[in-house]
Image (cartoon, rainbow, N blue to C red):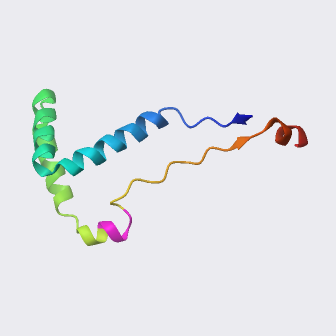
Amino acid sequence: MTSTRPPAGFLRDVAFERDVEQLHRLGARVLTELLRDVGARTAHMTSIEARVADFADLDPSLVRALGGDKFAMPPLTLVTSADDEARS
């Protein structure tokens, strides 16, 4: 049995998305603390504040309607048996 391998970094991306979903469930306070911490550690607080203001202007109904509130489905991995390969 063989399978096509997922793209490089795929598992890291999925783990990151799962962590972000968990962070979101913790609420606005935790997200604010994270953004402040990243801003302080990287000296990019002004940029973070500007991006937060941009995203805060988005219409939640429109984001939901366009599917922007959900992560994309992960790609499917094709798994075949040796018999399938021999027939090709």
Q: Nearer the viewer, residue 76 or 48?
A: 76
- The residue lying at 46 percent from left, 35 percent from top is 11
| Residue 51 against residue 82 in the figure, above or below | below
Whether 66 is drawn above or below 30: the answer is below
Place of residue 83 in the rendered image (x, y in percent of width and height, measured from the top left) = 85, 39
Q: Main secondary structure of the magenta part?
A: helix
At x 13% / y 27%, what residue is drawn?
41
Q: Splitting the image into 4 quarters, where does residue 33 fall? A: top left
Quarter of the image holding residue 38? top left
Q: Per the image, is 68 magenta?
A: no
Name the one closer to the observer, 36 or 11: 11
Instruction: Name the residue at 66% across, 37% down.
Output: 4
Left/right of residue 8 with respect to residue 2 in the rendered view:
left
Placement of the N terminus among the 4 image quadrants: top right
Q: In the rendered view, tell whether residue 77 sits above or below residue 1.
A: below
In the rendered picture of this protein, how many numbered marks are placed on residues?
0
Q: Position of residue 82 (x, y in %)?
A: 82, 35
- What is the span of residues highlighted in magenta in the rendered image? 63-67
Relative image position of residue 28 (x, y in whole percent): 13, 51
- Which residue does the image show at 14% across and 55% down from the upper left? 53
Q: How far from the left and from the top, in percent, is residue 71? A: 39, 53
Q: Quadrant of the C terminus?
A: top right
Q: Seen from this angle, which residue lies furthest right? A: 87
